[in-house]
Image (tube, rainbow, N blue to C red):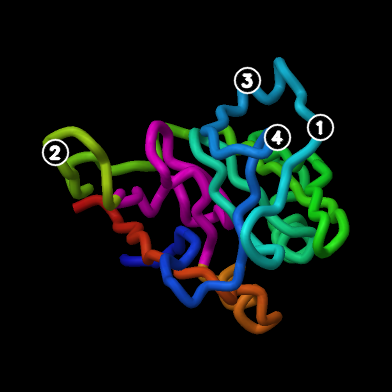
């Protein structure tokens, strides 16, 4: 059996109007261990309007309140997923509450033999183990940029709510064992 999941990322385009959400008025990578040890409290919107989803680097993603409202019912009670509210400051559009998403990744969900790599050992296209992800709607893959993977069900709800502008969604495949 094959099932598809999706990994969102911001479109790279000269015509994009969505801005970037950054730390400390600069572009730096973030890791959840650092953010939990050293709470910074605020993020900043740069160069455009508020996006719905932003990959902040490391293993941290940031989502809008609208995204959280759609995703949260699918992950309620899951101790491996945490939403941390944070204020995003914009002098032009006013401040908004966003959510850092921390996902405790399970290394067992990836079929490393069927996944694709670049430069030998860098995982670029994960192949997921269907048995491990079949009941999941949001999860992450350890040690990759794929720290925020959503189910087709969540993807369709986001699309129907028109919350996917400025984003692309890479399909990620889940396969049963051979």
Residue 41 is inside the magenta segment? no
Q: What's the residue at 59%, 72% (across, down)?
A: 17
Residue 120, label in figure: none
User: What residue did someone put label 3 on?
Assistant: 34
Q: Secondary structure at mark 2?
A: loop
Q: What whole-number distance in Å separates the C-alpha atoms at marks 1 and 2? A: 37 Å
Residue 41, label in figure: 1
Q: Secondary structure at mark 1?
A: loop
Q: Position of residue 125 (x, y in %)?
A: 27, 52
Q: What whole-number distance in Å separates the C-alpha atoms at marks 2 and 3? A: 28 Å
Residue 79, label in figure: 4
User: What residue did someone put label 2 on?
Assistant: 119
- Mark 2 Cα shell of 10 Å, populated few (<14), some (14-19), many (≥20): few
Circle nearer the viewer, 2 or 4: 2
- N-terminal of the pair, mark 3 or mark 1, is 3
Circle nearer the viewer, 1 or 2: 1
Q: Is 161 located above or below residue 37 in the figure?
A: below
What's the magenta region?
Answer: 126-151
Q: Nearer the viewer, residue 110 or 65?
A: 65
Q: Secondary structure at mark 3?
A: helix
- N-terminal of the pair, mark 3 or mark 4, is 3
Q: Nearer the viewer, residue 20 or 150?
A: 20
Q: What's the residue at 67%, 39% (across, down)?
A: 25
Q: Position of residue 96 (x, y in %)?
A: 85, 55
Q: Is 10 located above or below residue 160 in the figure?
A: above
């Amino acid at each position: 059996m094959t099932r598809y999941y999706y990994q969102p990322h911001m479109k790279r385009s000269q015509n994009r109007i969505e801005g970037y959400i950054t730390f400390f008025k600069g572009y730096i990578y973030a890791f959840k261990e650092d953010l939990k040890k050293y709470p910074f409290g605020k993020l900043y919107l740069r160069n455009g309007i508020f996006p719905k989803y932003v990959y902040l680097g490391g293993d941290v993603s940031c989502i809008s309140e609208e995204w959280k409202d759609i995703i949260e019912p699918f992950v309620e009670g899951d101790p491996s997923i945490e939403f941390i509210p944070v204020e995003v400051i914009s002098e032009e559009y006013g401040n908004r509450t966003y959510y850092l998403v921390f996902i405790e990744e399970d290394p067992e969900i990836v079929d490393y033999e069927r996944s694709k790599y670049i430069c030998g050992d860098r995982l670029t296209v994960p192949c997921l183990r269907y048995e491990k992800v079949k009941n999941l709607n949001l999860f992450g893959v350890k040690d990759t940029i794929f720290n925020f993977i959503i189910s087709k069900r969540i993807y369709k709800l986001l699309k129907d709510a028109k919350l996917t502008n400025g984003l692309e969604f890479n399909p990620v495949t889940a396969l049963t064992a051979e």
